[in-house]
């Protein structure tokens, strides 16, 4: 293996400052995506800077400072720039086209009181598990599965394919703050009954994903007071 390839493996580009830094400057991922060189998007320096400028929850506004005394004018004052516009959260993305298959109303539990669910892993291996009728109907309605027969559904996406679909659909932009995003987040947390479907998942940066935790979308919007990115012309196109 060449020295250049080994160097690339030991470094990573930060999503915010764009600099190549050693892997030790990035937090390690956890869960299914954890690996020897699996690291999160922002470096430690950028994470510290963003946490420093973040306003504390329910903090009282600071009193306005007294304006400084005007200095004598030695040259014409340039025109005042327009106030920066805050990040405008886009509407929820539309659902993908409805796949061909029977309507979810035909689903029934089998004699054991469950509905079968099957799919494929990231490596193409088939898997099978059991679920309840309500979950099966929700997965089909939210375009994450199709009906095979009245007792079985099939998941459309593997874990890796689903993550790539959400990131590309949202253009790798965090739905909550407008910064570059490299993770997906559930609008209704799984702890509160949400499912991993195109209707319930959006792209998010790692900081928003960790800050939101198990909050609902409405609770997170009301409590989060961090500064937002100013959208440019490309965001409005």
Image: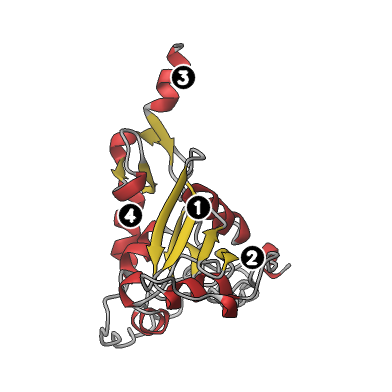
The quadrant in which residue 133 appears is: bottom left
- Verify CB contact (< 8 Å) between mark 4 and mark 1: no
The disc label shown at residue 5, or none: 3
| SS category of the residue bearing label 4 | helix
- Verify CB contact (< 8 Å) between mark 3 and mark 1: no
The quadrant in which residue 135 appears is: bottom left
Residue denoted by label 2: 232
Eyeballing the image, is 42 above or below 186?
A: above
Residue denoted by label 4: 47
Mark 3 → mark 2, Cα distance in angstroms: 36 Å
Q: Residue furthest right?
A: 237
Q: Tell us which disc is closer to us: 3 or 2.
A: 3
Position of residue 35 in the picture relative to residue 186 (left or right)? left
- The residue shown at (26%, 87%) is 60
Mark 4 → mark 1, Cα distance in angstroms: 37 Å
- The residue shown at (32%, 83%) is 65
Q: Residues within 10 Å of mark 4 (few under 14, many from 20)?
A: some
- Verify CB contact (< 8 Å) between mark 2 and mark 4: no
- Verify CB contact (< 8 Å) between mark 3 and mark 4: no
| SS category of the residue bearing label 3 | helix
The tag earlier along the polypeptide, 3 or 1, is 3
Q: Residues within 10 Å of mark 3 (few under 14, many from 20)?
A: few
Residue denoted by label 1: 119
The tag earlier along the polypeptide, 4 or 1, is 4
The tag earlier along the polypeptide, 2 or 1, is 1
Residue 73 lies, in percent from the top left, at 55, 74
């Amino acid at each position: 293996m060449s020295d250049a390839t080994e160097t690339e493996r030991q470094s990573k580009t930060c999503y915010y400052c764009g600099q190549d830094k050693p892997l030790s400057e990035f937090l390690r991922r956890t869960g299914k995506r954890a690996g020897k060189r699996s690291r999160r998007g922002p470096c430690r320096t950028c994470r510290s800077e963003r946490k420093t400028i973040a306003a504390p929850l329910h903090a009282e506004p600071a009193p306005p400072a007294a304006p400084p005394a005007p200095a004598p004018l030695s040259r014409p004052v340039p025109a005042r720039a327009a106030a920066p516009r805050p990040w405008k959260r886009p509407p929820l993305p539309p659902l993908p086209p409805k796949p061909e298959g029977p309507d979810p109303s035909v689903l029934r539990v089998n004699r054991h009181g469950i509905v079968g669910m099957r799919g494929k892993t990231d490596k193409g291996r088939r898997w099978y598990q059991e679920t309840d009728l309500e979950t099966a109907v929700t997965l089909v309605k939210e375009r994450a599965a199709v009906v095979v027969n009245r007792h079985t559904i099939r998941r459309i996406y593997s874990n890796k394919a689903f993550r790539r679909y959400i990131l590309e659909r949202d253009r790798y932009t965090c739905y909550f703050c407008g910064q570059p995003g490299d993770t997906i987040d559930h609008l209704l947390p799984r702890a509160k009954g949400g499912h991993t479907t195109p209707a319930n998942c959006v792209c998010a940066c790692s900081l928003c994903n960790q800050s939101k935790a198990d909050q609902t979308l409405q609770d997170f919007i009301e409590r989060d007071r961090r500064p937002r990115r100013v959208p440019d012309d490309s965001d409005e196109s």
